[in-house]
Amino acid sequence: MERTRRDALRLAGVSVAALAAGCLDDADTPAGTPTDRPTETSTDRPTETPPTNGQLPPDLERVDEPPYDITVPECGDISSDGGGRDPLYLCANMATEPSLSFEQAHTRGSVLADAGLELSDDSSGDELFATLLTEASDLDRVDSEADGETAQLIRETDVDSHAVLVVQTGWGSGSVYPHLKRVEATGDGVHAFGCHSDPCIVTDDFTSRTTAVRFERPETLETGVVSLTVAPDERWNVAAGEGVVSVPGAE
């Protein structure tokens, strides 16, 4: 698996010379890749108290290939809604069942005050983070200054009947975000499956992206795993409670 092949697949058939205000990039830049990286950064990264066992299942690697076929659509008219193609095409052929009922919201950056990706001088590679919010006290982990749909979804959770899985990826364009398509109950928790969005046109900001998923509580909820397809030949896997993990690149 080569990252150059992944980038080539992401860029199929798209070229945009310039776009209006809003700092939009053309698709000659891979989805989620910035043109400029900020230099003023924070080096402090809080340590999470894991609410799960914090380990991937023994049969799951950090990086593997999606277990389903993916067709990469060409970008058509970039002036149309979605930039010429469905930005969630990486999820198109993913199974939707079995799944607990759930709802989700996404945002740029983080919504948690005590854990997650923090921008630092060495934030150049891909990083991944997941955590479960299962108790009423966990809802207080939301940053007091965070607002919007994602923070609201977490704060309004009834933990007697539901729990929240927070997934965060970095680094790159904020127009790329994690999207979950299925939350499957396992013997001791949940395994969520989804993908990165891959629009034809991306903003040139440099950020992490967070998705919060509120799901119906299964009978047992001790562990959480996320499998996120990020390219036609690449899927990332992370367990809740691992903390921030670095995704190994192609050798």
Image (cartoon, rainbow, N blue to C red):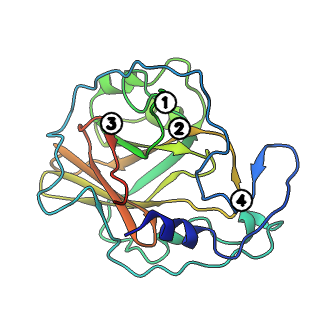
Which residue is under mark 4? Answer: 201
Given residues 148 and 197, the one toward you in this image is 197
Given residues 40 and 210, the one toward you in this image is 40
- Which residue is painted at 61% across and 35% down in the image? 37
The residue type indicated by label 3 comes to: Val
Q: Are marks 1 and 2 in contact (CB under 8 Å)?
A: yes
The residue type indicated by label 1 comes to: Val
Closer to the camera: disc 2 or disc 4?
A: 4
Which residue is under mark 3? Answer: 244
CA–CA distance in space, label 1 to label 3: 15 Å
Q: In which quarter of the image is residue 193?
A: bottom left
CA–CA distance in space, label 4 to label 3: 28 Å
The mark nearer the N terminus, 4 or 3, is 4
- Point out which mark residue 111 bears: 1
* Element type where label 2 sits in the image: helix
Instruction: Quarter of the image for the N terminus: give it.
Output: bottom left
* Element type where label 3 sits in the image: loop
The mark nearer the N terminus, 1 or 2, is 1
Q: Where is residue 202 in the image (x, y as percent from the top left)?
A: 68, 54
- Point out which mark residue 127 bears: none
Dot 1: within a 10 Å radius of its alpha carbon, few (fewer than 14), some, or many (20 or more) residues?
many
> In the figure, is residue 46 to the left or right of 80?
left
Closer to the camera: disc 3 or disc 2?
A: 3
